[in-house]
């Protein structure tokens, strides 16, 4: 028969603060039973829950592959990307007169024959 544990007993069993256990209960992270205002836990449920949180020993080969993956991705030519972006911006802002659009080089007084 499973023994039911109180919040105090679970906190002692897991070596965490009572407030942490209450927080897990509130967010429904830990399996629990509620009888009226009392919160109880089955020891077997707590043990199973802890097993789900177990972290495996680090496999060096898997870790190396994860770390090296960004390095082995195809390289992008940053110079070409920057050059293309600059060219696109130049095309958007190009003004042939280098100044106010109403300024035209070479305007002067007209002479009678229509030349400048």
Image: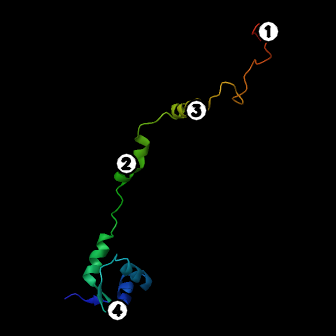
Q: How far apart, in angstroms, are the residues tagged by discs 4 and 3?
A: 69 Å
Is tag 4's residue or tag 3's residue first in the polypeptide sequence? 4
Of tags 3 and 2, the one toward the viewer is 3
Residue in the image at 36% along x and 88% along y: 7
**Residue position for label 3:** 92
**In the structure shown, which secondary structural element does the residue marked by tag 4 occupy?**
loop
Of tags 4 and 2, the one toward the viewer is 4
**Crowding near the residue tagged with mark 1, few <14, some 14–19, many ≥20 C-alpha atoms within 10 Å:** few
Instruction: Please name whichever residue, 110 or 60, is drawn nearer the observer in this view of the structure.
Output: 110
Q: Residue furthest front?
A: 112
Vertical arrangement, residue 57 with respect to residue 6, above or below: above
Is tag 1's residue or tag 3's residue first in the polypeptide sequence? 3
**In the structure shown, which secondary structural element does the residue marked by tag 2 occupy?**
helix
Q: List x then y, in percent, for residue 98.
A: 70, 27
**Crowding near the residue tagged with mark 2, few <14, some 14–19, many ≥20 C-alpha atoms within 10 Å:** few
Is tag 3's residue or tag 2's residue first in the polypeptide sequence? 2
Q: How far apart, in angstroms, are the residues tagged by discs 1 and 3?
A: 40 Å
Is tag 2's residue or tag 1's residue first in the polypeptide sequence? 2
Give yes or no for contact between labels 4 and 3 (Cβ–Cβ under 8 Å). no
């Amino acid at each position: 028969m499973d023994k039911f544990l109180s919040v105090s007993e679970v906190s002692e069993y897991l070596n965490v603060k009572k407030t942490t256990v209450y927080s897990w209960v509130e967010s429904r992270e830990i399996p629990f039973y509620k009888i009226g205002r009392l919160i109880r836990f089955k020891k077997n449920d707590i043990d199973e829950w802890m097993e789900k949180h177990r972290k495996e020993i680090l496999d060096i080969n898997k870790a190396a592959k994860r770390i090296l993956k960004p390095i082995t991705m195809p390289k992008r030519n940053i110079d070409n990307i920057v050059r293309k972006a600059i060219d696109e911006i130049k095309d958007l802002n190009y003004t042939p007169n280098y100044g106010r659009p109403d300024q035209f080089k070479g305007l002067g007084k007209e002479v009678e024959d229509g030349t400048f």
